[in-house]
Structure formats: structure tokens, C-alpha cells
Image (cartoon, helix red, strand yellow):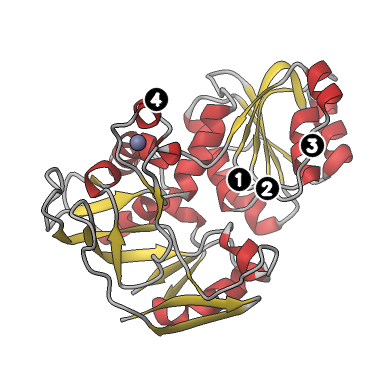
Amino acid sequence: MRGAVLYGPRDLRFEECDTPTIIKPTDAIIRMAVTCVCGSELWDYRGLNPVTQTKPMGHEYCGIVEEVGRAVTLIKPGPFVIGSFFASDNTCPNCQAGYQSGCEHREFVGDAQAPLLRVPLADGTLVATPEVPSDDLVPSLLALSDVMGTGWFAAAAANVKPGKTVAVVGDGAVGLLGVLSAKQMGAERLIAMSRHASRQKLAREFGVTDLVTERGDEGMARIKELTDGIGVDSVLECVGTQESMMQAIRSTRRGGSVGYVGVPHGVELNGQEMFYAHVHLHGGPAPARRFLPELIDLVWQGQINPGKVFDLTLPLDQVAEGYRAMDERRAIKTLLRP
Ligand SMILES: [Zn+2]
């Protein structure tokens, strides 16, 4: 089969690679229905994370179970399943606490931009849909594998509750789905920080009430203005830069919460400032597995449509163009069809 492999900055190839097989008895092999490109992969693609050896790409996946190892008991061949980018046993103390992305036995699933995928710890990782979904549901179900689970975690970590005022820093796919998540959790006033027309439009569609186009300290000042100088109850930080992190912390009211899911690059926090800010900070790689049953249900009932963040669909063999389009901000997120 052929899959996506990164060779170096902006050098992504779709090339022949080994067909995955069951290696451990707890593995499953799934045939990809659709896959996609993650914003976090642009860090590698742009060379901001050094690529020292060729790297298979892709960690968002859903599809039909083809084969399972002999120790897999809950998942059988046949169903449509979704899993998270971290495989987890779903039984260790960290999983039991809802932090499957911190599972004691976690394994990163990192070669999903291919027609077939080996998923470790299949029983703990994969969640089946009620039946094989109709085509129109598939993009939204794929989104639950990472991007929607991450937006949802940002909102949960930021303690979004009905009636609260919420701001979202970052208008990438995660930020936009953070908006959708906060709306679904009952946010009353919902402020998005965005300066791109197409993204503002989707943010409005997902429930944003106010748009702020300023960034950094100016963005923070604008949020203070909108909240009588107090700041918002919850901020979802969905970028991962020093500027976005400080903007998030400084936009939060005393006692409020920041949920941060942008992978930090060069972020450093000042102890004194944090001490006097009175702000809760919680974040990390999203335990997408925790939310899968609930989010599958919401998609299945037509209550949420996170698949709307895919504004470019390409055949999998054009994956390189999928990266280019996101790198150049011509696309919010690329869906790939094997
Ligand atoms: Zn675990």
C-alpha cells in the first residue's frame, strides 16, 4: 500500500510502505474510511520540529475493523470504529481517571494517512458506532478522533458551564470546534479571536456572539473592554505560542479557567505573574477517548456537525497538496479519502 511520509520541511511524499499486520495480540487492523491532516502536523511539516528521519504521518482515523489479534475480545471484525491518536488500555488508573492520553501503556498512532492502519490496545482504544454510518456522518465522526475531542477537552478543561462567558484564542480547526463545544456546553457569551473571514463565518455558525480581531495584549485589552474590565470566565487556548498563552491567561477573570490544548512551542510562564493571576490552568494532549461515546451520540443524533471544519476534500494520493493548502492557509482542514 501507499502512505504519507515526511522527509523534511515541506517534503511530504505519498509512497510505497509496508502493509500493517497484527504485531501484538492486542492489535487491530482497520481499513480507513477517511483520514485527514492535523494542524499539529504543520509543526513538523514546516520544520519547526526538526525531522531527523523519515516519518509516517497521520493520527486521525476511523473505519471498518478488518482483523483483530487473539487477545482482543470487545472489538470484532466488521464494525465502524473511531479511535484516538493515543492508543490506551482504558483500564489503568490514569485511564480510569479519564486521562487516556496519559495511559500508562499509551502508544502514539502515527501512520494514519494510509488505507490501512494498525491500532494497538484495540479493546481500550476503539469505540464502535451504533451501525455503519451513512456517508454524510463520516467526516463528523472522523473529527472525534482528535480535532473535536481536543476542542471539547479545551472547553471542559476551561470549566465552561451554562450561562458563562467564554473566549477562544485560535481560529484553526481546534479553535473553531472549541467554539462549537463551548456552545454545546451552554456558554452564553462566546468570543472568538479571529481575523480571517472564512473562519469568522464558521465561528458565527458554531455560535460565536463576539469577534475580536486584535491579538496579544491588544486582544486581551479588547476582551477586558467587552467584560467591564473583569475578563471572561473561561478561555480556550488553541494555538500554543507564548503570545496566545499570555493572551489567554490575561483575558481570564480572577478564579476563571484556561483550558490549553495548543501544543506549546517556546511557552514560558512567569511564576510571579501566575501567582497573582488567580487563574486555573489545565490542558495537555486531549483524552479524546474519554469523550468518544458521548460525542458519537451527539453526532449520531445530528446535534453537532464538527465535520464542517473540513473545507477541502482530496483523494489520499494528493495528501501533499492537502498539507500545502493548510500550510498556506488556503484550507482550514483537509479531509483525505483513500
Ligand atoms: Zn491506561
Q: Secondary structure at mark 3?
A: helix
Q: Which residue is mark 1?
A: 175
Q: Is residue 95 visible?
A: yes
Q: Quadrant of the C terminus?
A: bottom left
What distance separates the C-alpha of mark 3 from that of mark 2? 11 Å
Between discs 3 and 2, the one toward the N terminus: 2
Between discs 4 and 1, the one toward the N terminus: 4
Q: Secondary structure at mark 4?
A: loop
Residue 74, compared with residue 230, is above or below; it is below
Check disc 1 and give the amino acid type: Gly
Q: Are marks 1 and 2 in contact (CB under 8 Å)?
A: yes
Residue 1 image point, x, y percent:
30, 81
Between discs 2 and 4, the one toward the N terminus: 4
Instruction: Judge the density around disc 2: few (<14), some (14-19), many (≥20) Cα neighbours within 10 Å.
Output: many
What distance separates the C-alpha of mark 1 from that of mark 2? 8 Å
Q: Which residue is mark 2?
A: 239
Residue 57 image point, x, y percent:
47, 68
Please, which residue is most extreme toward the bottom here? Answer: 16
* For discs 1 and 3, the disc positioned in front in the rendered view: 3
Instruction: Judge the density around disc 1: few (<14), some (14-19), many (≥20) Cα neighbours within 10 Å.
Output: many
Q: Nearer the viewer, residue 111 or 227?
A: 111
Q: Which residue is mark 4?
A: 97
Q: Nearer the viewer, residue 187 or 1?
A: 1
* For discs 1 and 2, the disc positioned in front in the rendered view: 2
Between discs 1 and 3, the one toward the N terminus: 1
- In the drawing, does residue 203 fall left or right of residue 138? right
x 47%, y 54%: residue: 308
What distance separates the C-alpha of mark 4 from that of mark 3? 30 Å
Check disc 2 and give the amino acid type: Val
What distance separates the C-alpha of mark 2 from that of mark 4? 26 Å
